[in-house]
Image: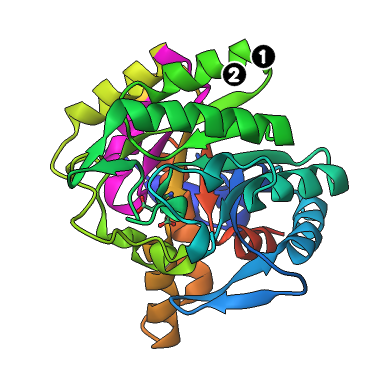
Amino acid sequence: MLYRRNRILRVSPAIRAMVAETSLSANDFIVPLFIVEGSGITEEIATMPDYYRHSIDHTVKEVKELWKIGVKSVLLFIKCKDELKDNKGTEAVNPDGLMQRSIKAIKDACPEMVIMTDVALDPFSSYGHDGIVENGKIINDATVEVLARMSVSHAEAGADIIAPSDMMDGRIAAIRSALEENNFHNTGIMSYSAKYASCFYGPFRDALDSAPGFGDKKTYQMDPANRIEAIKETLMDVEEGADIVMVKPALAYLDIIREVKNAVEVPVSAYNISGEYSMIKAAAKMGYIKEEQAILETLLSMKRAGADLIATYFAKDAIKLLS
Ligand code: PBG
């Protein structure tokens, strides 16, 4: 008689911990931060309960706290004033813009924290699109030029890693060469390589008031039907100089995370995006699921799928739960 007792390895918490294949730690998390003009401001985002937009002074406090609990990296987004938006990304490259001032303030206060910055035009665009619009179309090459200048201005302010989220063609190569030309040899690039046209970005667009004014983003973000295309996009970004690649969203694309992980030799990150956050918050509030367990289970699923890093609004909760 042959006995196969798989349950032996599940008998107690101790043995389960010993044989766990995947684990989460503070080192895994990238914390997205939303920054607004002004001072003394902490305002809750209507569609993201318990998540906030902060003015620079409060952001600095938050970053210091994050560093204390073990977070190594933050990803900055700014909410641009309406009157500064145009169709050229003027404010995006302003050396004295909110993003550039935020980077400096955080670097001064917490120099060891790895600062990643979002590079795309949507928060600065009067059309709410990631690129420059001409005759109703998002034009690629002129956009890439601005993105490269924007990246250099972030590097000048002190950003450690540039994170282009726009999905224009050729932007990684353009950003890498612009950084090199300006002597930023140690500034990295985390490319949103496989970024899908997803409905789950909704709450984020509310947070930054950056929803597209016309149409959708399907001519630059990927079709959720596609898998092989994600590999193509990612391999091209690595070839062009991406140091870290990203799959976004995470939950509905766990298969893509795994395929990308198997295809590349650079760290892979996953973005546990706003809609994924808000769904858990809403379901927990209704009493349909337990929030704490849902947070750890979904983050673990991303790690198991192959994510080396996870950008997540749940980082603080997760770290608390893990300790
Ligand atoms: C914009 C950008 C988006 C997100 C990150 N950068 C939204 C979009 O592409 O419309 C989404 C993040 C989230 O939903 O949490 N380039």
The residue located at (37%, 39%) in the rendering is 166
Against 169, is 134 above or below? below
Q: Secondary structure at mark 2?
A: helix
Range of magenta residues: 240-261
Mark 1 surroundings: few (<14), some (14-19) or many (≥20) residues within 10 A? few
The residue tagged 2 is 179
Mark 2 surroundings: few (<14), some (14-19) or many (≥20) residues within 10 A? many
Image quadrant in which you'd find residue 186: top right
Q: Quadrant of the C terminus?
A: bottom right
Is residue 241 found inside the magenta-colored segment of the image?
A: yes
Of mark 1 and mark 2, the one earlier in the sequence is: 2
Is residue 249 found inside the magenta-colored segment of the image?
A: yes
Image-based side of 175 in relation to 37, left or right: left
Contact, mark 1 vs mark 2 (Cβ under 8 Å): yes
Against 205, is 170 above or below? above
Whether residue 263 appears in this view of the structure is no
Disc 2 Cβ-to-ligand 1 distance below 8 Å: no
Amino acid type shown at disc 1: His
The residue located at (34%, 41%) in the rendering is 131
Amino acid type shown at disc 2: Leu
Residue most extreme to the right: 109
Image-based side of 39 in relation to 301, left or right: right
Image quadrant in which you'd find residue 259: top left
Against 131, is 162 above or below? above
The residue tagged 1 is 185
> Camera-side residue: 30 or 239?
239
Disc 1 Cβ-to-ligand 1 distance below 8 Å: no
x%, y% of residue 137?
19, 42
Camera-nearest label, 1 or 2: 2
Against 304, is 45 above or below? below
Residue most extreme to the bottom: 286
